[in-house]
Every structure is written in structure tokens, then in C-alpha cells.
Amino acid sequence: MKTHVVVFPGSNCDRDVAVAIEKIIGSLPKMVWHKDTSIDQSDLIVVPGGFSYGDYLRCGAMASTSPIMKSVIENAIKGVPVLGICNGFQILIESGLLQGALMRNSSLSFICRDVIIKTTNSKSIFTNKSKISKMPIAHNEGNFFASDDQIKKMEDNEQIAFQYCNENGDINDESNPNGSIKNIAGILNQNKNVLGMMPHPERAAENIHGCEDGKTIFESILN
Amino acid sequence: MLAKIHITLKKDVLDPQGSVIANSLKSLGFDNVRDVRQGKFIELEIEGKDRDTATKQCNEMCEKLLANLVIEDYSVEIES
Amino acid sequence: MLAKIHITLKKDVLDPQGSVIANSLKSLGFDNVRDVRQGKFIELEIEGKDRDTATKQCNEMCEKLLANLVIEDYSVEIES
Amino acid sequence: MTSSKWQFQTDQTLVESHGLKFDEFEKIVEGLGREPNLTELGIFSAMWNEHCSYKSSKFWLKKLPTSGDRVVQGPGENAGVIDIDDGDVAVFKMESHNHPSFLEPYQGAATGVGGILRDVFTMGARPVANLNALRFGEPNHPKTKHLLSGVVSGIGGYGNCIGVPTVGGEVNFHPSYNGNILVNAMTVGIAKRDKIFYSAAAGIGNPVVYVGSKTGRDGIHGATMASAEFDEDSEEKKPTVQVGDPFTEKLLLEACLELMKEEAIIAIQDMGAAGLTSSSIEMASKGNVGLEINLSKVPMRAQNMSAYELMLSESQERMLMVLDPSKETMAREIFQKWDLEFEVIGRVTDTKKLILIMNGKEEASIPINILVEDAPEYQRDYIIEEPSPIKEYLPEDFDQSEIIPDLLTMIAHPDLCSRKWIWEQYDHMVMADTVVRPGSDAAVVRVHGSNKGLAISTDCSPVYCKHNPYEGGKHAVVETWRNLVASGALPIAITDCMNFGNPEKPEIMGQFVECIRGMGDACSKLNYPVVSGNVSLYNETNGEGIYPTPAIGGVGLIKDLSNVKTISLKGEGNYLCIVGKSNNHLGNSKYMTIIQKKEDGGTPAINLDEELANGHFVLELINKQLVMSSHDVGEGGILIAVAEMCIAGNLGLNIDEDKEFSHRYFFGENQSRYLIEIKQENFEQIKQLAKSKNISFEKLGEVNQENIRINKSNIIKVSELKHYYERGISEI
Ligand SMILES: Nc1ncnc2c1ncn2[C@@H]1O[C@H](COP(=O)(O)OP(=O)(O)O)[C@@H](O)[C@H]1O
Ligand SMILES: [Mg+2]
């Protein structure tokens, strides 16, 4: 499987996700610099977490205008799986590949801790192995927002990938870490080949992490 | 020319930062404060002579980068 | 009354955001942009009738909470 | 000149405003053979202030043990270096950013983190962990909440952005910090032993290169400010505090590490306190060469900057390097790729002078040796005050029916409660190598790509130091040591941050001297040398000094990550046992300060032989896989330690009823003790082993599902305890 990880100035989970991909998928991904202009022949493009451009102005805004994003968008349109994690999710939203907006956490502070998420659409290439999983979040702006209409459309079209929940799978305010509408933790595009998610599967990918639920995302793609 | 750009959250978007500020102000004794909203203020020097061109360019900057139109509104003023 | 408060970094203070925004705008083709500075814009409703009192109160809010005078300047306008 | 002694042209008030004393100025004139110009005066002022010259502390710091089998580089470079096997080294240091953080908590703390990160990656190490040691005033002091939240978000803001996990730290509250908070930041990095970079300039004619951000008028005289006492109007003076740019630092980190893979850098030094001045002088002095710098070449952010301003600016995210001239082009390309400034601003010379040129005019010419070797060094007067007397408290001194309510009050107190509110604001998992997250004794991070890890912990007990600086100094060192041991690590070395009041007061100087003596004795005994550190003096407001606070950061090695221990109880039916004698010392304990609201009863003494033996015993048990979980008994005594283990593991404990039912037993804080959880079937074996080594070892109780039970009328549900434990800090 040929995989690519896009690296922006300020990305800081690029190595982490590459390590996880190598362990789980079995081959080292190719790291693609933001100034490059093309990615050809990929089976998976990952837009990793971090603070691209320092998260200055608005998370993901400046990265979404980088030269490489044109190629990411072209690939996404062709149907290549694209996974955006955390800052990567913010970048995919800013680039228009995914809908909605990610606003400041309702607590107004950065949150780093484990959360539990429930797979809402378990039929996509990314989610066919997971049900309820635990993995860490680490973000300042993960508060998903979309208009009522948009949410309705996304629901009808099964674009909601993950929702924050408790151990029993109940989706409620207590299990919502950041104020996201409908506890949304991850969404898909219309064609379901683009996934953006706030939790970090690469940080729940080996035994030393204390939990390995994150592996399912990559195993699902392998399937 | 100097461009002054204001970027504010749309009316129907919740502004948690604004409400925290409002609460803090109240606890400092400013009881007559209502409805605080926080936005961004960007100033930039733009070379050129024509105000209309500059305004057009700034609008474009907002659409392309500075504002997120899903949740934000913007306004541009040019001073020369 | 509506108070409009601008909080900006003092002139000699580094504005990391501003310079990164400037670079991004340039790479989007806006070559005539110089010197971007980002600040905060706070709007608040303040009850009362007297503009001077309101201005004074807003100044106080800035000094006490909204701005850090070590690195920031502020300005207050009242609209009624 | 007004004073009759002064026959100089230079204005006396100008000299004073540069923080220089008359005799210091005389020394400058003597050395130069003439009076300095303004730029030169600024340079002397920056180099000779307390922060850069260590003029009050140097004499005493030399007494600390700094060598050991694993020490690769002790104090004297940007950070200390220790060997961690397989050709790997750990590089670490702690640094203070106290004054700026009081003025602007977010930026002050953020730039503190930025500064210590640079110290570590300057040496060629990739930073892998950040920690901190924080002290605030009383929880209900009007400034505390604002300062706490600003500092925490500043530390997170910088560390999270640059992508280095903040894995631990410590925080305490005490009125002595009402007007002087302490923000000490520590960074640990990992490098290859044969790829460490130093700061000694070499190679006459080699280019001196400036990289990173542009220079602005930030924090001019920051270093002088950091060495001056606060008074009523320092907040009014509004000195410029620097604004941090973690994004640029991330680029600088990656660019430096990329260039370090090539054989291009001859010397490298970050620009920290006193920016271009201290970095250039340090490089020249270490290399015993001169430097000629053309200031017109320095990348500038502001217009019309003078030589004086350029030399004293404390703009962040900058480095100075001496490069192999044949690699200049390649190096430039790397920095351009990362969108950073890269400018050749000077040459290495054989003049042994620092010569500054600006717009073709010579702005300064100073022999390096008078700046460095002739720097003032004081043996300040000191008085060692009598330590507070040790008192023994009896069970009947306190109402015993209150033990459980006291436990609840204590565990909810900001000094003892969960720090989750803080560490959840820090990305403590980025880099995906965090093995033990914040909340246990030591944080553990894996050495990337291996099965070994580093255990790291910061600690200090200022109340102990105040009432007995010698024992307090020992305590601070030993507490980190014990934390590392409890995590299953072999402790290797420490860094320190010596935060004290005004050293010109003999009783403060006495505290410093005694803390150093205590630290030194502990380090020697435990084979736990000091490899780097920092001194922050003049932490005073209106003549009130802070408590002596020698914050310690300890680093240890875990050779096999499967041996990592945490504090969380593992299973019902297991025994929880105490290693180490319980002498029931309640003096100056958390019980006394929180419940009795007084500092009384003296600082407990530490028997270092026992400390060493107990620690080695625990390590031996861990290495024999006999320990399920472990925790040192620290602040708050046995019952607090039990509570923390229960809450972490979501299990309870039936305490054996043969224990003395008293405050002094449950909350006493005598040292050198651990709680270890073991399987029942191993109890006898361990007991025999302890006996053979003459180590005190007793069973405390048996792990149960949900309660801490002392006896039939003193029971508390762990879930209730947890509720108290977790609400503390966020309520400040
Ligand atoms: N308390 C101390 N104990 C041991 N070494 C110290 C102490 N304080 C400072 N040092 C050492 O002195 C040197 C200079 O420290 P400092 O001026 O803080 O470094 P920097 O210039 O990198 O900020 C460093 O090598 C540091 O490790
Ligand atoms: Mg340094």
C-alpha cells in the first residue's frame, strides 16, 4: 500500500502518524512537503495533526492555501482516501473538502485527554472495524459547528463518522469534551473517502499508549 | 494605504469567549455590561493608489483567507 | 450604548501572527501587502446614558482586564 | 560627576541605571584603559548582572558534585548531558522565568519554555519532554487565579505548538509568593553521544552566522530586570516583556537539527538572556578567540535600531553559529527552506576582543577576558539561622475523630489535589512516546525507537527549606530521586533552579549556602550529580523575600519499559506495604499547614543511608517483578499516598487495625518511605529479603474494591474521595 503524509511548517504529529502507519500497514509512508505540488499514486493521504503555521489567524486556514493542497484535493476528488487528524481535520475543512467549522473549545482551553467515541457510520473505508473506541484528543479548536440544514444533510447522507460518548456508548453533554454540535468527533465527505477527526488514532496505536483502539482506523483501510 | 479589517462572528454563532469576558467584567463590578462579542482586528499596509482597488483586494483576502465565512462576517475600511 | 474596543500590540512588540499572515497573503498573490498586525476587537453593550461615563468605564475595563498594558494598547469608541 | 570619588565623564546615574556599582564601573575603566561608551556600558551591564555572571552564587555552586560515571557534560554548557546507554545521551536543564511571568503570565511563561527548549536543541538534542515547577501566592489572593491560568496557558501555548509533550511538573501555593511567582521550566532532549554540539567558537576567519527571527526592541534590559527587586511601581514601569513565537521556534528546531546532521557547525549558542551580547561573548570566551561583528548585517524588525539596542535586545527564537565556510551555502539553503533568517554577521578573529562595527563605524571594542574572567564575583556575607526546633506531637494533641474529614480537606486543598486541570491543558502525548502520563510519581517517556525510557520528576519543599535550609535542600533532591525510583528508574542526575530572595541580605545568603550544602550532601550520597542549573535571585517585593526554593529536576533511566511502575493500585487482594521506618514526624507537614494552619514543629531530618538502602531495595523488588504498583510517601503522609493510589487505580484499601490510630501516623511526613503493592503470595519472601538487608518493611493493608477503611467507624468511599480530589485547582 502506498501512503503519504503531508508535512506543513508547524505539523507535529507527522512522525507519530508515520510510525503508526508503518507498524500497522507495514510500509513506511512517503512524507510530502507542503511546497511540493503533486502526489501521484496514493492509496492513502494523511494530513497530520500539529500547529500548521502556528495555528495563527485560524487553525488550518493558512495550510489550506499551501501548494500541496491542490493535489490533495484532486486526489480526494478522484476517490483516494484522505484522512485528516486534528489539525489535519481543520485543514480539510478550511480547504473545503469537508463541511462545517471547528471553533474554539467551549471551555476556552486546550484539552488533552482520552475520550470515547462511537462509530456512527461504520461502513466507510476508515470505520469498518471500529464500534466504540478510546483515544486521546489534544486541541484548542475542536468544537464542530454547522448550520442546522448542513447537519441534517450530513445525517441523511451518513456523513457523521464519530460522536463523543461515554463507556456505555451514550451520547450526552457529559461526554462532549469541547461543545461540538451533536457531539460530533469526526465527519466524512459525501463520497465517504475523506475523513476528518479530532481524536488521535496514532496515539492509541501500541501497547505503551495504554490503549490500541486507534489501530482500527488503519486496519480498516487495509481491509 | 492602511486597511482596517474587522472579522466578527456571525450573529447566530455562539461566542463563548465573549460570554466569559462578560462574566469576568461583571465579577469586577461592571454590572451594566451586556452582550460581549470578541472578534479580530487586522491592520495592513497595502501599496497602491486606488481605494476601490484596495477595497476589492481586501475583500478578496477576507474571502480567501482572513475570514471563515461559515461562521464569520468581515468588513473593510481603507484609510489613505 | 455600544462600545467598540480595539486592542492592538504595541508598536515595537513582536506580532508573530501578523508576519505569518503577511507571508500567506503574499503567497496567495497579494504582493502589495506590507506589515500586517493582528489585534482584538471587542464589542459590548453598556447600559447607561452618559457617553463620558461609558468611555471612562470602558477604559477601566481595558486597564483591569481586557488589555495587558505591558504589551498592548487599547482604544475605546462609544456609539449610541 | 557629583561624587568626589568620581573623576569620570560618564554620568553616575547612567551607571546606576545599568545596575552597576561604583567599584564595578571602576573595574571596567581599569580593564578598558578608558571609559566605556554607551554600547559598551550596556554590554558590561548585561554580562555583569546577577543573571549572567552568577556573581553572588558562583562560589557556592562550585561546591555541588557534578561528576559521575554517566556524566558526559556537567554545568558550564547550555545544558547538562548524561549517558543513557547504546550511544544515546539525555540533555537537560531547568531555567527560571519568574519576573516576566509575574508581569505578563502568558507570554512570560511561554517565552520561558521557548528559552529552555533552545538551550537543549542548541546542543544537538531533540527535545522530548517539558516539565515545570511553579509557585503561586495563596489560592485566594486576588492575583493568583489570573496568574495561574495565564502561566498554565502560556506553558501549554508554547509547548503544544512546538510539539514537545509537557509531561509533568509541580505546583504549590504559599503567601511568600504573593508578589513573586516562580515559573521554572525544564526540557529534556535526546541526542547521540558523538553528535553533541558545543559553544566554543574556533577557526580564525570562520563566518559567524545569525539564524532565526529578526531582532526587534524586545525586552531590552530584560536580564537586568530579572536581577532587580520588585517595588510598588515596577508594574507601572511596564518593561517590555517578550512575545513568544512557538511556530518560528518549531521551524528553528527543525532547521537546526537538519543542519546538525551535516558536518557544518563548529559552534552554536542560543540567544537567551542578553541576546547577542551573551551569546557572542560566550562563544568567544569558550573558544579563547575574538569576534568581529558587523551589526548592520543583523536582520532587524524595527527601524533605526542602534548598536546598543541590537546588542541588548532579547528577541526570541534566534541562534548564533560558527560555520565551516565550505558549508555556508548548504546551510543557507536549509534555513531558507524553513523560511528563517540566515545572515553572516561576522568572523572569528585572533584578537580575543569583541569588536562591533555598525555603518562602518566601530561601536565597541572590548577584550573578552575582562568581560568574563574579570566579572565580579562576590562572597557575600551570610548568616545561618538556627533551624526551627523539632517538636514531637502526641496522638492526643489532635481530635482523632477528625481523621477522615481532615483527609477530605487535605486532598481537596490546592497543594494536594489533582493537577488534572493543569495537565489537561498541556499536550502530554505528542511524539507518541509518553509511557507514564502526568499524575504519577515521575513521568516516563520512551527513547524513540527503543524499549528504554527516561523517568523525569521535578520537586521542592520550600516550607521545609525555610525552616531548615540544609535539610530542605536534601529533601528537594531526595524527593525527585524517590519519585524516579518509585517509577522503576535508575536515578542518574539532576538539574536545579535556585530561586531565592535578595542575596545582599545575609540571612537570604545563608539560606542559599545551606540549601546548596544539603543538596550537595544528598547528591553525593545518592550518586546523583548536578549537571546543569540556573539561579534566580532577588525574588522580593517590598523587602519580603520568597521562601528558599531550590527546585530540582531529576532524570533516571528505565532500561526495560516493561518494568515501569505507576501509582495506580492493580488488584483486589494484593497487599500494600510500607518500605521504610515511620517516625510519625508531623512538623511542617501538610497536615500542619492545611489543617492546623501553622508552620510549626521543624523539618524532618533525612538519613541518607536509609534513603539509599530503601530506594535500592524498592528497585531490586521492581526489577525482580515483585511490585504491582508503587508510590513514595511524600507530602501529606501515608494516608494521602494511599488515597492517591486508590483514586488512580479505582480500588480501595483495608488498613490493618494494628496501626496507631492517630494523625501523626496517618499524616506524618518523615522521609525515605515507599508504598508498594505486592501479591499476597510474595509477602513472606519480600519480608525475608527486607530483614536480611535490615530494611523496615511492614504490611499496611489489603486492596479492596471501593473503600479506604481504617477501622469500622472510619471508612470513606474512594469515589467520594475522588470527588474532593478532583475539584481543587479549578476552583481557585
Ligand atoms: N544552580 C546551578 N547549579 C549548577 N549549574 C548551574 C546552576 N546555575 C547555573 N548553572 C550552570 O551555569 C551555566 C550558565 O547558566 P545560564 O546562564 O542559566 O545558562 P544560559 O546562558 O543557557 O541561560 C549553565 O551551564 C548552567 O547549567
Ligand atoms: Mg543557553
Image (tube, coloured by chain):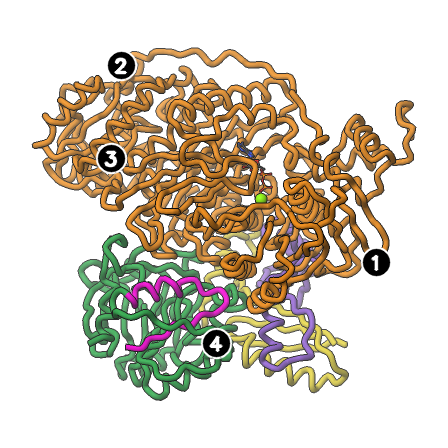
Chain colours: A green, B yellow, C purple, D orange
- How many marks can you see? 4
Q: Which residue is mark 2?
A: D395
Q: Amino acid at mark 1?
A: Asn
Residue at mark 2 shares a chain with residue at mark 1 = yes
Q: Which residue is mark 1?
A: D359
Q: Amino acid at mark 4?
A: Ser
Task: Answer with left or right where residue D468 lies relative to residue C23.
Answer: left
- CB of mark 4 near ligand 2 (< 8 Å): no
Q: State which chain disc 3 sits on.
A: D
- CB of mark 1 near ligand 1 (< 8 Å): no
Horizontal and vertical percent for residue D274? Answer: 67, 44
Q: Quadrant of residue D655?
A: top left
Q: Secondary structure at mark 3?
A: strand
Horizontal and vertical percent for residue D68? Answer: 43, 31
Earlier residue among tags 2 and 3: 2
Queried whether the magenta region covers residue D287, the answer comes back as no
Q: Nearer the viewer, residue D177 or D528?
A: D528
Q: Amino acid at mark 3?
A: Ser
Q: Can you tell which of label 1 and label 3 is closer to the viewer? A: 1
Q: State which chain disc 2 sits on.
A: D
Q: Tell me if residue B32 can be seen.
A: yes
Magenta residue span: A1-22
Task: Answer with left or right where residue A97 lies relative to residue D637.
Answer: right
Task: Answer with left or right where residue C79 lies relative to residue D424.
Answer: right
Real-space CA distance between mark 2 and mark 1, rounded to the nearest whole angstrom: 78 Å
Q: Which residue is mark 3?
A: D630
Real-space CA distance between mark 4 and mark 1, rounded to the nearest whole angstrom: 43 Å
Queried whether the magenta region covers residue A13, the answer comes back as yes
Q: Amino acid at mark 2?
A: Pro
Residue at mark 1 shares a chain with residue at mark 3 = yes
Image vertical order of residue D470 relative to residue D347, above or below? above
Residue at mark 4 shares a chain with residue at mark 1 = no
